[in-house]
Image (spheres, coloured by chain):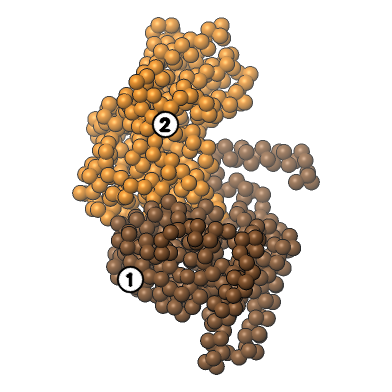
Chain colours: A brown, B orange
Amino acid sequence: AQRQMIRLRQMDNILQNAQRQGRISFYMTCRGEEAIHIGSASALKQQDVILAQYREHGLLMWRGFTLEQFTNQCFSNDLDLGRGRQMPVHYGSRALNYHTISSPLGTQIPQATGVGYKLKLDAAKMEDPSEAGIAICYFGDGCASTTDFHAGLNFAATLKAPVVFFCRNNGYAISTSVEDQYAGDGIVCRAPGYGMAGLRVDGNDAFAVSAAVRKAREYCLTNNAPILIEAITYRQGHHSTSDDSSRYRCPKEVHDHSTSTDPVKRLNKFLHRHGWVSSDDTAKIRDEERMAVLNAMEAAERRPPPKLDTLFADVYEEMPLHLRRQEQQLQQHLAKYPGRY
Amino acid sequence: GFANKTKMNLFTAINSAMQTALETDPSTVIFGEDVGFGGVFRCSTGLRDQFGSDRVFNTPLSETGIAGFAIGYAAQGGTSVAEIQFADYIFPALDQLVNEMSKFRYRSGNQWNCGGVTVRTPVGAVGHGGHYHSQSPEAYLAHTPGLVVVMPRGPRAAKGLLLSSIRSKDPVIFMEPKALYRASVEDVPDDDYMIPLGKAEILRSGSDVTVVGWGGQLRILQKACDMAQSEHGISCELIDLRTILPWDVDCVVDSTEKTGKLVVSHEAPITCGFGAEVVATVQERSFLSLEAPIQRVCGYDTPFPLVFEKYYIPDELKNLEAIKKVVDYAQ
């Protein structure tokens, strides 16, 4: 878990810098929320379906998404599983049961309810109940204000879908602090309004998050019912590389959190205190992971983009005639202007 | 031909298609507002009793929830048939339809898809529907790459097209002309049959004018073509697009190159209606074959009115005038 967190933070640091250097167009870090990622991922089984928002890449990392796969997506190269179609950090992996990220907020929430409902019907036919899965859906404090949040939770409660709705309350939606986002007591207080169970957890404690998700998962499968988890954490980084958070919050606030509540530091201190790692161990891991990220990034950067014919593929299962014709039009245009594109 | 046929109206034909889907694909579920007791238009009558409330059920009142739920269920490998009670209320779901459903396969690099989704929704004028029970929003959805948009003209087409839509590997929006639910009765095969998507149908062959429409408008256009023939000796070739997106360009182009004249008619407002797409494409492909400017006979650019509905509707008289106009122009 410690290695995963360190790898995650190294990847965030290096890719954020890569954007600042103009090598990738965009990036989003999860600095400060690593305990949520690693804690919850470690409590899930591979058959649980993850529908995330955009700041949950540590779960994907835990599941097995490689540094090569992360960087290939960020560099939009020919090995990107998404075929270079979306901005960086919009990862997805069918093999790892992680839905492809989309930019619109909250849309994943009612979708998670649909996934959970299907999982419930499938579980009823299974011989081995340990193979049953849940849907787990992640979103932030801002996203919890959307209409899709309301619809998704209400549907899950009434239709009895085994879904964990996991809110990362990190204090900010871009520049909007939670004071401007809601007047109630956070997000979890809404659960009883839907007739749903809920629990709040320290999002910076990897063990607490893991225990919470494990219990929540059991609850969902036992009761065929959803549950809302609110994990309190802090967004140490900017919203994205398009944001400069010093414009709306004071550096002292960020500094205080990065020293007192930082989840990576907390886990590190815990492991040290019990004598399970030494400073040398940690430094060695940090160096190894840093090199691994750099190597993956440099390899990804050298690769070519996907082939142009992927532009028209996958709009439908089979390419319809009108797209074949548009593809021909583009090819004819390129033949007339070689080297101009 | 099919051995056994039954006289069915539109809602019975749709019911028959959904029953067949539920029988042949155990992952099929049917849901939406009031679907459980049979639906406000009776399309799902009897299905909950037959297949159980796990598979045929009511959802809470939220179109965005219905659409999102349908996507998730299909992404997990199931077949979801979602009902939006009136197409006038599809707009809260537009984010899920346009930003999610249509892009689900493409954005994932074909790892994920929600081809198992079919969204059914009643459209069109009904005599007293006014602004919010009469709309035909096919143009909004046809502007969305990745969706398939289908509109049957009657019960027989509806059953075959709906089964194709449900079984399609792409997400389909299936628009049902509500005025025909009870009023249109045809012989419909009892069997399981499918009508291909993306293909128009020529309802009558003709040599003088090509007339194109979809959905409930075909009944009006049949009358207009009858009048053109009987009163003016004009031979019309009448085409039902059946699928709006992707539409059968070659069928309409070939016909227009034969007749040299085209009239397109739809209930939805004329500006940026789907007729504009048909006209633009045909004139681009067949400019030199045209003997007259292409005519569109459509609803006016107003919200769908209540007391003046009969003036608003592009009826058979307005279509007859357009047919005569192109014939006269060409002479």
Q: Quadrant of residue B19?
A: top left
Chain letter behind tag 2: B
Q: Secondary structure at mark 1?
A: helix
Give the left or right position of residue A206, taking residue A300 as reference.
Answer: left
Q: Quadrant of residue B2?
A: top left
Say if A75 sits above or below B312 in the image.
Answer: below
Spot occupied by residue A69 in the image (x, y as percentages of width and height):
61, 66
Q: Residue at x 48, y 46 (%)?
A: B95
Residue type at numbered disc 2? Ser
Spatial distance from mark 1 to mark 2, Cα to Cα? Answer: 45 Å
Whether residue A124 is visible = yes
Q: Residue at x 40, y 6 (%)?
A: B231
Residue type at numbered disc 1? Tyr
Q: Residues within 10 Å of mark 1 (few under 14, many from 20)?
A: some
Say if A75 sits above or below A44 in the image.
Answer: above
Q: Quadrant of residue A201?
A: bottom left
Spot occupied by residue B109 in the image (x, y as percentages of width and height):
56, 55
Give the left or right position of residue A5, taking residue B195 as reference.
Answer: right
**Which residue position holds label 1?**
A219
Chain letter behind tag 1: A
Q: Residue at x 65, y 89 (%)?
A: A280
Identify which residue, B50 or A23, lies in the foreground: A23
**Which residue position holds label 2?**
B136
Identify which residue, A201 or B139, lies in the foreground: A201
| Residue A167 numbered tag | none
Q: Confirm or deny contact between disc 1 and disc 2 (CB under 8 A).
A: no
Identify which residue, B308 or B112, lies in the foreground: B308
Say if B43 sits above or below B238 in the image.
Answer: below
Spot occupied by residue B303 in the image (x, y as percentages of width and height):
43, 27
